[in-house]
Image (spheres, grey):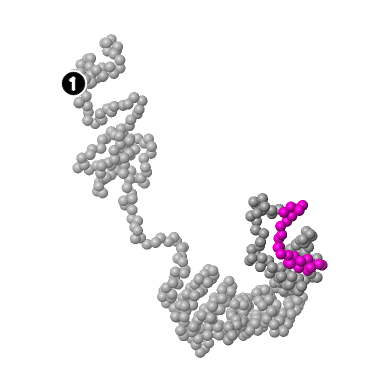
């Protein structure tokens, strides 16, 4: 018994490894029932040789075959998550291989052996396809330009096509330049009758007078269509029908200015649209000269009279907007004809400010308008040109003139009384830039490699340009 305690731990195991089957005894114990190393239980892996000081984990091996589609797997409920580092083996359930599989998965494998067995393959069940239609989020509208590339094939009637385009210009006025040509070409193929042309004019007029922000864009659209629509029926072309439609509203101007609030609001929209038409509608003469419609100029004068004849606040505000928009152009046109219509309008405004029972804010607007007109409608006068300047009226006339030097080194400019004689003497010299001498020594003499490389002669082109400059300066000074 004492012998057993005197033996070092594991000494009997080391000696018993060399014994055969049943070779165990009291001295070579370590295997019960005399079992040797060859009779180890099959579920225990054989011991691996260990290098001293190095911990070698068991080698990993990928599964040779993936589980077939029909194989049953024990997958925990909920979304799959990758195994956490250091997770216990029983936290991940390995897949059950079919009974026909030849590779047996050991039950008591280590965590490193269990991790490669977990197969998460949700991608195999994906329904994504390269042939799927394009996805558009809610509220997304495709580019409007694409809808007009095919013309009007998708629109059953002319009114729907035109109204859709007008709404688009209202929302995106910047697309006018890129889409107006296609729109006009489509109309040329669709508008072929008098009724269709009349319907087109009415749609544009209603859009321009019902939406305040569309008055300018509507005037531009009318100007473009008046020059590019090819249809010209006996009842009148596009511009003539448009002016006839405006005349219908113009004839009831006095009743509209005295009407209720809704009627006045519609009338004010018409007035501002007519002002935009006067500025943007171009009429080409027989000689190719572009002019404005004189009939609109007369109409605007009468509309101003109707507004000032009923000096309520909204009528006066509309008159101020119209004069700010067209005042400078109207005054220039009236002055060319020798008329004093603008003076009469300003006088009428001053009378309204003194006598009318309008609000204080409206009176301030009218006074600001009079002040704007006194400053030439905010236009800046052009400054005097260089040719108009003279030494008598411009103290800085000689400020930018060059300075010359005589042969004695005396400076002189164009402001000197004897400038003409000195400058003529300078021109008569053989060389414009002679070699400079200092204390009688020629600085450009031989022996100086840097100065020897300097070309004393001017380039012919530069010399010619310089002479022209001098002559031009002399000519301007004599003027």
The N terminus, quarter of image: top left
Q: Nearer the viewer, residue 462 or 185?
A: 462
Compared with 248, 473 (above or below) is above
Say whether residue 363 is visible: no
Dot 1, how many residues are within 10 Å of its Cα: few (below 14), some (14-19), or many (20+)?
A: few
Q: Residue at x 67, y 52 (%)?
A: 446
Q: Does residue 223 appear left or right of residue 35 in this picture?
A: right
Name the residue that disc number 1 marks: 20
Q: Residue furthest front?
A: 446
Quadrant of the rendered structure where residue 354 is?
bottom right
**Quadrant where the C terminus is found in the figure:** bottom right
Tell whether position 72 is magenta: no
In the rendered image, the residue lying farthest to the bottom is 234
Dividing the picture into quadrants, the one containing residue 18 is: top left
- Residue 2 lies, in percent from the top left, at 28, 10
* Residue displayed at 36% across by 40% down: 83
Q: Is residue 451 above or below residue 164?
A: above
Q: Position of residue 101 (x, y in %)?
A: 21, 42
In the displayed structure image, the side of residue 173 where residue 105 appears, left or right: left
Q: Residue at x 36, y 25 (%)?
A: 53
427 and 69: which is toward the camera:
427
Q: Is residue 309 left or right of residue 280?
A: right
Percent position (x, y) of residue 155? 43, 75
Q: 383 or 137, which lies in front?
A: 383
Judging depth in this view, the residue of 412 and 454 nearest the camera is 454
Task: Tell me which segment is drawn in magenta.
Answer: 417-442
Q: Is residue 433 magenta?
A: yes
Residue 66 quadrant: top left
């Amino acid at each position: 018994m004492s012998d057993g305690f005197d033996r070092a731990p594991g000494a009997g195991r080391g000696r018993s490894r060399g014994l055969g089957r049943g070779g165990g005894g009291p001295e070579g114990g370590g295997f019960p029932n005399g079992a040797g190393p060859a009779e180890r239980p099959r579920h225990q892996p054989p011991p691996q040789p260990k290098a001293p000081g190095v911990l070698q984990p068991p080698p990993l091996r990928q599964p040779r075959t993936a589980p077939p589609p029909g194989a049953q797997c024990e997958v925990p409920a909920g979304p799959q998550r990758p195994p956490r580092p250091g997770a216990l083996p029983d936290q991940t359930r390995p897949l059950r291989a079919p009974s026909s599989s030849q590779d047996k998965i050991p039950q008591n494998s280590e965590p490193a052996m269990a991790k490669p067995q977990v197969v998460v393959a949700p991608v195999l069940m994906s329904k994504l396809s390269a042939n799927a239609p394009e996805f558009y989020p809610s509220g997304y509208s495709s580019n409007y330009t694409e809808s007009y590339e095919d013309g009007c094939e998708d629109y059953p009637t002319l009114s729907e096509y035109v109204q859709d385009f007008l709404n688009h210009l209202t929302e995106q006025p910047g697309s006018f330049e890129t889409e107006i040509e296609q729109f006009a070409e489509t109309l040329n193929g669709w508008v072929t009758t008098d009724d269709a042309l009349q319907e087109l004019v009415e749609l544009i007029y209603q859009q321009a007078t019902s939406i305040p922000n569309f008055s300018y864009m509507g005037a531009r659209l009318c100007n473009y269509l008046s020059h590019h629509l090819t249809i010209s029926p006996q009842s009148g072309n596009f511009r003539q029908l448009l002016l006839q439609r405006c005349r219908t509203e113009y004839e009831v101007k006095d009743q509209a200015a005295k009407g209720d609030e809704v009627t006045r609001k519609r009338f004010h929209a018409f007035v501002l649209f007519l002002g935009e038409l006067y500025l943007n509608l171009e009429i080409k003469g027989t000689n190719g000269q572009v002019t404005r419609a004189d009939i609109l100029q007369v109409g605007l004068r009468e509309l101003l009279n109707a507004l000032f004849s009923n000096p309520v606040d909204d009528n006066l505000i509309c008159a101020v907007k119209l004069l700010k928009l067209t005042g400078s152009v109207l005054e220039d046109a009236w002055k060319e004809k020798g008329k004093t219509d603008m003076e009469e309008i300003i006088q009428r405004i001053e009378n309204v400010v003194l006598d009318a029972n309008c609000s204080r804010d409206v009176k301030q607007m009218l006074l600001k308008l009079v002040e704007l007109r006194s400053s030439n409608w905010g236009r800046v006068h052009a400054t005097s040109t260089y040719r108009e300047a003279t030494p008598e009226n411009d103290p800085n006339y000689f400020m930018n003139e060059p300075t010359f030097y005589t042969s004695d080194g005396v400076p002189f400019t164009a402001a000197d009384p004897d400038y003409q004689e000195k400058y003529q003497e300078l021109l008569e010299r053989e060389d414009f830039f002679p070699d400079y001498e200092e204390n009688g020594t020629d600085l450009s003499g031989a022996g100086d490699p840097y100065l020897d490389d300097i070309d004393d002669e001017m380039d012919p082109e530069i010399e010619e340009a310089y002479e022209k400059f001098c002559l031009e300066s002399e000519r301007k000074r004599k003027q």
